[in-house]
Structures are given as C-alpha cells and as structure tokens.
Amino acid sequence: MTPNGPPDDTAEPTYDRRSILSGTGAIGLAGLLGSSTVTSATPGRDPGPRTDEIVLGISAGADDVAAEARSAIPGDAEVVHTNETIRYAVVEFPSTAPDRAREQFIDAVTASPAVEYAEPNVTLQSLLEPNDPYYGYQYAPELIGCERAWETTRGSEDVVIAVVDQGIQYDHPALEGTMDERIGRDFLNGDGDPYPSSGGDHGTHVGGIAAGGTDDGTGHAGISDCSLLSLRALDADGVGSLSDIADAIQWAADADADVVTLSLGVDGSYRTLTAACEYAADRGVLLVAAAGNDGSDRVYSPAAEDSVVAVSAVDSDDSIASFSNTGPEIELAAPGSRIVSSTTGGDYGRMSGTSMATPVVAGVAGLALSAHPDLSRSQLRDHLRETAVDVGLADDQQGYGRVDAAAAVETDPFGDDGDGGNEDESESDTGDCGDETVTASASGSLDGSGWWGESKRYGYSLRTDDPCSITIALEGPSRGDFDLYVTTDGSSPTRWSHDEAAAGSGTSPSLTLDLEGDESFGLQVHANSGSGAYTLQVEERGR
C-alpha cells in the first residue's frame, strides 16, 4: 500500500532512511490494579484495570507459590495467577467485597512468614501527546549521529530488542524485515500472537523507532536494524496490569533479549515491578524506560528502578521537552518530540513523549552492542553514559547527557587512554594503598516495618587507577535499624542473595573490603525497623 505518512513539498514519493529524521511520540504512566500471566487460573480475562486484585510476593523459601498464596487468603478470595520465577501470586476478591476488606487483607497477610509484600495489581498506561501529523521532517537520527554510526553498523540481527507495549504490527512494511522469527507473545490473551488491537498504534510506533528497516524504500528512519520482539501487555487504550507487564519483562529475559524498552509507567513504587526488572538485569538485559509525560519533577516506575535506564525527552534543539518528567534518576536524554515512525495499517505518523525518546535509546544501545558484541549489560550501560553528549541541561533533566549513536559505535569501550598496561601496573605497585581516594555518597529516607520494610538499591563502579580497598558505611536514624547488603559483581543484592552484609541491631553498619580491581558493586539499604533519613557513604582507596 502507499503510505499515508507525513507529506512534505520536497519529499520523494518514498522515504529514504538516511535522508529523513524522526519526530513525535508518547509515554506510558498511570496507577492501576490488574492481573498476571505465567500460570493463569482464569485465562482469557479482559485486559485493563483490575481493582479487585492484590499481588502477593512469596518468599524464596516457600516451595509452591500458589499453595502458599492459597493458605494465606480468605475463603471468598481466589488465586487467579502465579509466577513461580519472580515469585508472586495474584489474588482476586469478589467484586462485592468492600474496599476495607482488601485493606485489612493487605495488613494481615504480610504477617505470614511466606509473604514478603502485598500490593494492588495496579495499571500502567501509555499517555500520548499527539502532534500535527503533517508537520516537518524527521530530525532524531541526524541529531544523535545515526548517519555516521550507520557507516559502521546498521545493527545486527543477533541483537534483540524487546518492546513491552500494545504489540507491534509485525507485518508492517517497515518492520517485517526486522522482526525476530519468534515474533513475541501476547500477555493479554495468553497466546503467541502479539498483534495490536485496532487503534493501538503506540507499540508499532515505538518498535519502528527502535528498529525500522534501513534503506528499504519504506516510509521512515528507525534507529537500528536490530531484531524486534513484540510483547503485548497493554490494550488498545494503552492500559496494562502490573502483573502482565512483570510477566512480559521476565519472558523477555528468558528469551535472551539484549535490550527491553518500556514506554510505560506508573506513579509510585511496586515490588512486583522491581523484582521483574532485577530478574532481567541479573540475566544481562539492559532495560530502558520512559520518565513520564506530565512535566513534573518525579520519575515514574519502572524508570525510577535502579536496574533501569531512565530516559527524558528533548526537542530538536536539545532543550528539555515541555512534557518530559525530570528528576535525579534521569540517566540519559533522547529526542522525543514530533517523532515520525510506523503506525498500524501499514501507515506512518508523528507522536511526542518520553515514550518516543525511550526506543531511541534502545536503538542506540542495539547499535553499540552490534559494534561491540563483547559488552556486558553493565559495560553497555556505562558505555552509553560515557559517550552521551552534555547539551547544557541540568543533571536532573539530561542525566549523563543526550545519547549519541556515532560516539557509542565509534568509541572503543575497551581502549586505553595512553600508556600501556604493563607500565601503569609497575608504577602502581610502588604506591601505598590510600595514596588515591575517591568518595561518593547518597541519601534518602525509608520506612521500616520489620522484614517488610522499604529498601533502596544503588550501584557503584570503581574509579581509582589501581583500587585496593573500599569502605561502605551507612548512617541510619538514631532510633532505627537499617541494614546494608552488598554484591561485588554489580548484580542487585537482596536480603537473601548477596556477597557481603552488615545487618543486625544498630544505626551505623559498615563494611571494609580488600579489592582485586575488577569488582562492581550493588548496594542495598534496607529499613529493618524504624523510619527516617539515612546517608550511604563510599570511600574507595587506590595506590
């Protein structure tokens, strides 16, 4: 069919990828209640908000997630879905049950040693900011240096980008050549056909930004030619449940996706979402997510998760987009205004939002990994940070900077800055441990209520030339008991999975460790009891 994409007086009848830039999109946010998928007791339920459902997190020590959940719920409730991998169960109450019954259930069920948390099965949503579909040319690929990057690689089909969204029109002329042979999965209907519903353009638009066909005579310029997996977890209205999205993230990790792009979000923190993101990150998946579209100074989840790259949106002149959320969690910025991409029906259109900026980052990550296939997840994340361009915005607007495809592809992530390694090593051997020191700190506040108290996670990479020792110290509230958990391989620590810990009664736990030099640290602060502010201090010593 002839595309009905954004016309231009000087445009050729077809769009060449290298001559057209990108413009418009949207993002996902919201608050909700919903359901899940890996094992469903009531398959085929309608998607969307599910206000009668509660998600229970089941402890690692329990043998059977479903059995533990059933033993903890009242007789009028039903376990309708379980995920044995992320270890949660979805409990549905009768629609006639009063709200107070659900509130009392959440308070009571966490007394069970097998239940780690209970939270509503909230709804995440994609919120579009549509723009004039006939205005201007695409600009994003040129702005971020794609044309230079494409001289080296257009993206490898071995690099897989999973799109958790409304589903991708996988037979779209611009996308059928980049779809992974597995296509993906539909978590709303529980089958292997993630084709979007009528009117559900968001997922197809997001997928086309990350990986549309290059120089194929079709109507727009995606960022890469990497392979796409379509994971349908949002309905035609852009609404999806917490549990469906968690299942989709887990499925992507188990399917060996390299990058997962999440143009969706919710205001608040939910441990089911945290668990899903950490599961994927621990398996080498780079997750990128939209910061939010209401122009506020808070970053929505899952973008706010420590295991996820939070993306803000900039305009064609590298100014922060008026709709983009900002905050200290922002890691990278990318073009997100008036982005041209594929839409359903084999068509093309413009959208604006952090939903559009997010797959730009995912596409650049795909290009970088195609050029440097030996990069680990953490190395890829660091590489994107280090090659980003400082466009003069505040840190809470741009993070490390606006993503740069050319630099990400052309810069050797393993290159030396000057002298050879042997000479550096011999020089460092003559020094004493502590001749060089680097300090870093973070602060926040947590509410502790025993085993189910709040937690916050951080990452730390070594910075001295020849690391030899590190001290990690936590200062908690005077009447609280805050614990410290550490991993040395960069993975996310938990109370039951960590390499080092300073836990027990006390307000100021600390750890001092000798270093080999190849460590990367994951840090968790957990409020075991009490509530209040804390400060986490890291002192790294080198020779």
Image: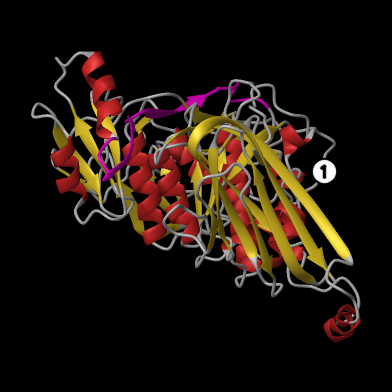
- Residue 128 sits inside the magenta stretch: yes
Which residue is rendered at x = 60% and y = 21% of the image? 132
Which residue is rendered at x = 67% and y = 37% of the image? 443
- In the rendered image of this protein, does residue 211 appear above or below residue 427? above
Which residue is rendered at x = 58% and y = 36% of the image? 356
Q: On the rendered structure, is 217 left or right of 85?
A: right
- Residue 509 sits inside the magenta stretch: no
The magenta span reads 111-135
- In the rendered image of this protein, does residue 365 appear above or below residue 241? below
**Between residues 231 and 492, which one lies in front from this camera angle?**
492
Classed neighbour count for the residue bearing mark 1: other residues with Cα under 10 Å, few (<14), some (14–19), many (≥20): some
Q: On the rendered structure, is 445 left or right of 36?
A: right
Q: Quadrant of residue 238?
A: top left
**Between residues 525 and 270, which one lies in front from this camera angle?**
525
**Element class at badge 1:** loop
Q: Which residue is mark 1?
A: 390
**Between residues 36 and 474, which one lies in front from this camera angle?**
474
Quarter of the picture holding the C terminus: bottom right
Quarter of the picture holding the N terminus: top left
Q: Amino acid at mark 1?
A: Asp
Q: Quadrant of residue 48?
A: top left
User: Residue 170 appears at what percent x and percent y?
Assistant: 38, 48
- In the rendered image of this protein, does residue 122 appear above or below residue 155? above
Q: Can you see residue 452?
A: yes
Q: On the rendered structure, is 224 left or right of 320?
A: left
Q: On the rendered structure, is 279 left or right of 374?
A: left
**Between residues 256 and 475, which one lies in front from this camera angle?**
475
What count of labels does the image hold? 1
- In the rendered image of this protein, does residue 159 appear above or below residue 507? below
User: Residue 266 appears at what percent x and percent y?
Assistant: 47, 29
